[in-house]
Image (cartoon, rainbow, N blue to C red):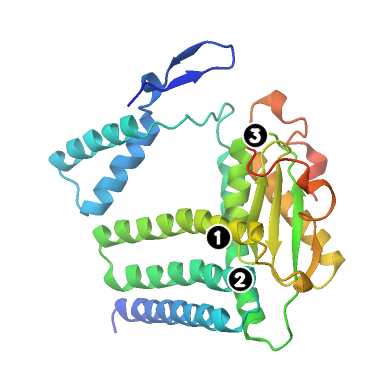
Amino acid sequence: MSPVLRTRRDGSTRPARHRAVQPLAVLWLTLVWLAMWGEVTPLLVIGGVLVAVLVCLAFPLPPIDLASGVRPLALARLVGRFLVDVVRASFQVSGVVLRRRPVRNAVVAVDLESSSDFVMTLVASMLSLIPGSVVVEARRSTHTLYLHVLDVPDAASVEAFRRDALDLEQRVLRALPPDAPVAPHAPDAPEEVGR
Amino acid sequence: MSWTTPVDVLAAVCILLGAVLTLIAAIGQVRMPDLLSRMHAATKPQVLGTVLVVIGLSLSLRDPAVVGMLLLVVLLQMATSVVSSHMVGRASFRAGQVRDDLLVVDELSDGDAHEEPRGAP
C-alpha cells in the first residue's frame, strides 16, 4: 500500500499513518471486541487493543475535531428527542402503511446553516433513522440535503418538515458546538432556545 | 411471585410489539406504490422493531455478556441502515425510478439543482 499523504490546512503534508491510531477509536474498537467475546479477561483486553491498533492502521480515518467539546445536557436532550421522534414517526409510518388513502410524497431541499461536514453527516444520519425521510442526495458544496419525505399532503407540511430538520440541526449544534468562527449562528444564542 | 414475573411480561410485550412492527414493514412492502415509499415502510419501522426485540431479549435473558452483544446489534443496525437506505434511494432517484405523480414538491429536479455536475462532492 502506498503511503497516504494528508494535506493540512496550512499546506504542509505528512503521512496519515502518524495520526491513524486515535486513542478514542482504539478504545471503542476494544470495547466492541470485548462485547463480542462477552467476557473481560486480561488476554482478551490485550488482544482487543492489538486488533484495534491493526484496524486503525489498515483503515485510517481522519480524526473528528470536537474543538469545544461536548455539552452533556444538550447531548442528552438531542438523544432523548431523537428517540421520541423515532418512536412517534415509526407509528406514523405504520399508520400510513395500513390506511386506505393513497400516500403523497415530496422531495424537500434542506439548506443546513452549519458548514461543517461532521454536522451534515450527523444530521443526515439522524434524519435517515427517523422514519418518514430518506436522504436521496447530499450536496457538500452548498451543504444541502435532499430528502424524500413520506406522507406530505400539501406545501404547508413541506415547510413544517423543513423547520423540523433545521431544528434538529440546531440541537446538534448545541450538543456538539463547532469551532467558534465556523458557525455564525451561535448555537447558544438565547433567543433561539424558545423556537 | 418474584420480581422476575413483571420483567418477563415486559420482555414479552416488547418482543411482540417489535414483531408487529416488522409485520407492518412487510405489509408496507406490498402496499406502497413506488420504490422510495417502500423504502420508508421497509427500513424505518424496522429500526424501532429491532430495538424493541433487542430490549425484550435483554430483559428476558438478563446476562451482561448478551446485553453487550445486543447493544452492538442495535448500533450496527442503525449505522448500516442509514448508508444502505441512502444508497438505494439515491440510485433509484438518479435512475428515474420515482413516481412523479405521487410527489407534491420535487425540489431536487426543479430549479437549478442540475447545475452542479452529478457525482461532484
Q: Are marks 2 and 1 in contact (CB under 8 Å)?
A: yes
Q: Quadrant of residue A114?
A: top right
Q: Looking at the picture, which amino acid does disc 2 mark?
A: Leu
| Vertical position of residue B44 compared to residue B15: above or below | above
Kindly state the secondary structure of the residue where label 3 is placed: loop
Mark pair 2, 1: CA separation: 9 Å
Left or right side of B75 for A12: right
Which residue in the protein does label 1 denote? B88
Q: Position of residue A52 (x, y in %)?
A: 28, 36
Residue at 45%, 67% in the rendered image: B51
Name the foreground residue: A72 vs A62: A62
The C terminus of chain B lies in quadrant:
top right
Circle 3 or circle 1, nearest the eye:
1
* Residue B14, position as x, y percentages in the image: 43, 76
**Mark 3 highlights which residue?**
A116
Regarding mark 2 in the picture, which secondary structure is present there?
helix
Secondary structure of residue under mark 1: helix
Pointer 3: residues within 10 angstroms few (<14), some, or many (20+)?
some
The chain letter under disc 3 is A
x%, y% of residue A70? Answer: 55, 36
Report whether A172 appears left or right of A159: left
| Badge 2 and badge 1 both on one subunit | yes
